Amino acid sequence: MSTERSGPLGLSETQFYKLKDRIIWAFISLATAVAVVAIVTPPYWMLNSSLSPFSLLRNIPAQWFPVQYTFEHYASVLFSSQYPRFYINSIILSLGVLIVVTTLSTLAGYGLTRFDFRQKRNFARMILFGYMFPPILLSIPMFVIWKDIGIHNTYIGAILAISATRLPLCIWIMWQFFQTVPYSLEESAQMAGASRFRAFYEIALPVSKPGVIAVATLAVQGGWNAFTIPKIILIDQKLWPITLGLQSFIKSSTILWPQIMAAVTMGMVPVLLFLYLLHGNWETISV
Amino acid sequence: MAHLEIDNLEKVFDTPDGEEVAVDGVSFEAEDGEFVTLVGPSGCGKTTTLRCIAGLETPTSGHILLGGREVTELPPNKRDISLMFQSIALYPHMTVRENIAYPLKVDGVSKADRTEPAAEAARTMQIEEMLDKMPGDLSGGQQQRAALARTVVQDPGVFLMDEPLSDLDAKLKAETRKEIQRIHEELGTPVVYVTHDQEEAMTMSDSIAVMNDGQIEQFGSPNEIFYRPNNLFVGQFIGQHGMNVVDAEVVDAGQGVSVAVDDYRPELRIEEKPRRLSTGPVKLGFRPENTVLETGDEHGAGIPGTVRLIETFGEEAVVTVDVGRPESLLAVIDSNRPLSKGAKVQVRIDRNAHIFDSETGDVLAHAEQSQKQPA
Amino acid sequence: MASSTRDGVETVASKVVGQSRRESLEEFLSDRKIMAFITVVPATLMFALIVAAPIVWSVVASLHSINALSPAWEFVGLGNYVELIGETRFWESFGYNLVWAFSTSVLNTVLGTAVALLLNQNFRFKRILTPVMLFPYLVPSAFFGYIVMWITTQQWGLLNQLLIASGLITSENVVAWFTGDPWTAMATLVGVHNWKFSIFVAILVYAKLQGIPDDLYEAAIMSGATKYQQFRDITLPYIKNVLFITVLLRGLWNFNMFDLIWVATNGNPIDSLITLPVYAYKIGFQFQELGKSNAVATTLFVVLSVVGIIYFKTAKPSQEVRVE
């Protein structure tokens, strides 16, 4: 019926290009598999170590798969260490950052979009410049300032400092987000008799819910991840979040590895929630 | 230049909700130098068919032969075809010249050797002076020409065009349409053109494939498709104003076929009486262009009705008439004719009508009083 | 709304008063100036706390000798800076720091782009793999630091175990990842750093890749472009800017990295891993010399500002903000 031309390698043309296509796909699949293995290995090892009986941890060769597992390390972390306290502290810090950052960035994002200012462009530059600041650079002078005004070594001091590092990114996101919300929606509410303020919280705010969720997630994540700022600002161990508190499992004579891995594993639970909330929304955090 | 043959093409997509048959056994041929249009409503599978020919989709089954060569599963660049996209798809970061010369660049043609063909293609499309601009600086029509130049420079065996005019305004559409026809005539390369606009299909093509639900309902010349629709779908889809369809009854299937719409018995001349026609209910289709409105109230002179709407387009006006049926009827009349909303009229079939099976919608007979070219 | 019946008059009237109080508050808040004020000023104040105050404070503090334990500030002028410049430690840190920042940001960008390109393919399990592959960026650096510390343990760490299992080394001569050769330590941290921070680049690049219209690729395919040509002629021009931004931002952040280094080395990094921020921390909080610590911080502010100026001059990020 048809004439199939012959291609290289003694195959027909169709067979040759099909083969070539397969090879390219095999290569892409292989690269993806390598990437996935590289990404999954550290958390896998964390989980494996946290579940392995202490005697098996020092096996050579290692116990690659959990043939025998135990929850004793979790129990020891939960019931005979300060870990629950650290966990609660992490939650307090995260919620504090959530409230400060979400409120301020939503208001600012709205104001920057809807009102005219002189120097708006410079303001934008300033925000992006603030975004570049690493926490360590802020926390050294902040320690001095906080000490002077008496809020170092307090939740409030840490929450404000952490919020400051998260705020620029979140203002930026809300600013970008409100630009996609047509002003005509609020105008129509105002024509219907609503005051401008009411149009903001009854119309603009609900419409920008996806942006607010992204910002809120990033705020909580910022609080949960914070290490440098609490380390410098919070001296009292009773106030430490998990990131700092893990240090208490390092004793002078020994490091309690399985306990640390169990503690880290439990600390990852909210991270999965962040992943779920930000999933499909990645472009919002790419400034 | 090549002869294109599509044989029983089928394309099934895997979707989260299960399988979706986009193309369901499509076959047609395009002779060398022929302009073939695939036309149909959105979702009918015309674009998928085109993308299979282009090689951007691999068909589930069936064959595509180009000049007798099996190309069904070859990558696009080994097929000797070019495709013009609905969205134009000019590379925004390249100048018009680089855009047009891009197919040559990937072909390994040296920079010096690709200037001339690119300029030549731009000359053909009359956008020579735009060569060093960026696509964003061009008007819509110029972008269209640049995109066309990029397909021309490839010197393909077949041109494929995927609704290239749908984003243009009416005037530009008409201009670019002529441009495409001119290029087609000059190069003599076969074109497979996809559109949802029946008017475009009717004016440009040598052959038309009317598609619906992944299948070709009818393949033929514009004349055939307009005057001898295979079924109700083709009849209603083609033609500027579609087709009026009324329930009717064949009262005499003998030598002199006689059809009744209530008390109205239009005079129909069936040239070749098909075997399948028998007495019983049918659908009678006739074009608004072939519909006459009588103002007399003589019983049985037409389908009685009331004028509901008159839309005037220059010399002609389209009148919507309520006839006490679910569907109202349209008639094209002289816009100078004094007729007003609410007037009582009799709708009479003037020349051509078609009798369709009332269940399957397949045509049973064409009744023609005289054959004229379509307007 | 006034009621016409006499009985209703009073209740309606009181309602009107209550409503009008709320309305007048809203009316007050709706004043253009007031509303502009309450939306933007709080954030601006917070902002002043981040940018202006620490800079000023840091500069002022750097001119003093401050002991973390006593409140007295003793003015020493440029003394702290002179002291720093005289220290080989400072210059060594600076040099190592540059190598560290450069190699990590380049590797982050290359690997991150590769991951983004993989994610942009239409493979079967994409819906599951995308979150898996982007997950590391959300993991707290400190958590990751502890995992790194555990994996790089000499005797029972996963890295050495894998090397032993694959026959590359024997259990007698295991690699001392962070405690032996300074360049080994840096190479190790550069390597593991990518686990989290390449993904940052991947997220940015992936978002950009998704913005490239499919039909550009299809047009290129129709023109006969190979995968490599499609990447060079379409993908690369589209992501050029974002690549530049990521190199710059990652370079800056990696230069200032503290948490991961501190945790992974158990607060005791080998010399090659003492980046300037780590150095500043040690001076300030282990040796209690806050003034000198702030002198290092001020130096870092200067570096940051230079990078910032390059960023704004070349990438022009603020132009993306539409000004009404």
Image (cartoon, rainbow, N blue to C red):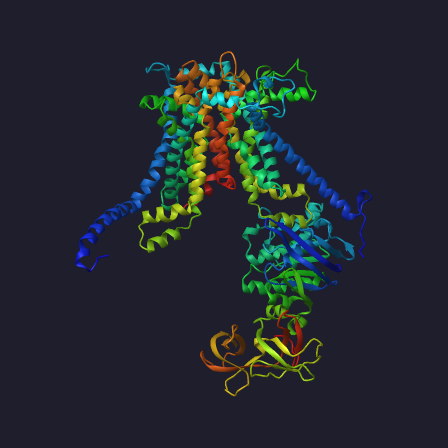
Judge whether C274 appears above or below A91 on screen: above
Query: What residue sits 25% from the left and 47% below the top?
Result: C24
Asked whether, in this view, residue C139 is left or right of residue B367, the answer is: left
Q: From where the camera sits, is residue A276 visible? A: yes
In the image, B339 versus B24, the foreground residue is B24
Judge whether C196 appears above or below C293 on screen: below
Q: How many numbered discs, if any?
A: 0
Picture quadrant of residue B197: bottom right
Q: Position of residue A49 (x, y in %)?
A: 57, 23
In the image, A114 versus A129, the foreground residue is A114
Query: What residue sits 32% from the left and 47% below the top?
Result: A197
Picture quadrant of residue A146: top left
Judge whether C23 appears above or below A259 on screen: below
Q: Position of residue C44 (x, y in %)?
A: 36, 35
Give the residue furthest to the top: A253
Judge whether B2 appears above or below A269 on screen: below
Give the residue furthest to the right: A10
Image quadrant where one finds the C terminus of chain B = bottom right
Q: Position of residue B26 (x, y in %)?
A: 70, 60
Q: From where the camera sits, is residue C257 visible? A: no
Q: Position of residue C195 (x, y in %)?
A: 57, 29
Image quadrant where one finds the N terminus of chain B = bottom right
Asked whether, in this view, residue B349 is left or right of residue A147, the answer is: right
Give the residue furthest to the bottom: B298
Asked whether, in this view, residue A120 is left or right of residue C182, the answer is: left
